[in-house]
Amino acid sequence: MKLIIKFVISILAILIVAYHGSVFVMPSITIVNNSGHTTEKMEVALPSSNLNFGSLMSNEQNTLHYSLEQSNGVYSYQFKHVNVAAFSGSCGYVTKNEIHKRVVITLNENNEVICRMQ
């Protein structure tokens, strides 16, 4: 019985370490809404995938991880405030297998978008 408990605990420990290791390795995009308005739609298109951040209230942020398997291209964003026309643009460059890349896209009060690569 003790052997089974040790085996189960070992497997759980390995799974926890593997999960946290994969989150550390996978690239991510963080959207920060400092616009003073609630957004009803925030999306970022990558060459091989599309990330939907949903709606964000003012001063909220959301982070999504994406696959290492990307084609070369840019981060194309599209934001839409509640009752306001959508606006879009692009920033930064994405390539295949960018391990632990962190991108922060901040939407300021005057709808100015600032992109930082970390």
Image (cartoon, helix red, strand yellow):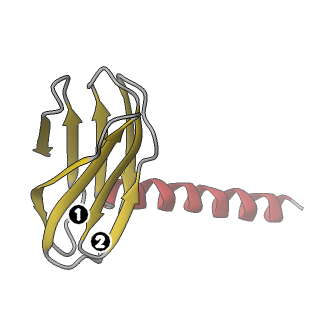
Q: Can residue 33 be seen in the rendering of this structure?
A: yes
Q: Which circle's residue, 2 or 1, is located before the other in the chain?
A: 2
Residue depicted at x 50% and y 58%: 19
Q: Nearer the viewer, residue 12 or 23?
A: 23
Q: Nearer the viewer, residue 71 or 11?
A: 71
Q: Would residue 47 appear left or right of 67 to someone viewing this image?
A: left
Tell me the SS state at disc 1: loop
User: On residue 116, which mark appears?
Assistant: none
Rendering coords of residue 26 (x, y %): 33, 61
Mark 2 near mark 1, Cβ–Cβ under 8 Å?
A: yes
Q: Quadrant of the N terminus?
A: bottom right
Mark 1: few, some, or many residues within 10 Å (few <14, many ≥20)?
some
Rendering coords of residue 2 (x, y %): 84, 58
Rendering coords of residue 81 (x, y %): 35, 36
Mark 2: few, some, or many residues within 10 Å (few <14, many ≥20)?
some
Q: Can residue 67 be seen in the rendering of this structure?
A: no
- Residue with the mark numbered 2: 68
Q: Would residue 27 appear left or right of 61 to someone viewing this image?
A: left
- Residue with the mark numbered 1: 99
Q: Within the image, what quadrant is residue 105 found in?
A: top left
Q: Within the image, what quadrant is residue 109 found in?
A: top left
Residue depicted at x 22% and y 34%: 107
Tell me the SS state at disc 2: loop
**Mark closer to the observer (2, 1):** 2
Q: Amino acid at mark 1?
A: Ile
Compared to 29, does 99 lie above or below?
A: below
Residue depicted at x 26% and y 25%: 35
Residue depicted at x 29% and y 34%: 32
Compared to 67, does 24 lie above or below?
A: above
Q: Within the image, what quadrant is residue 61 found in?
A: top left
Q: Amino acid at mark 2?
A: Leu
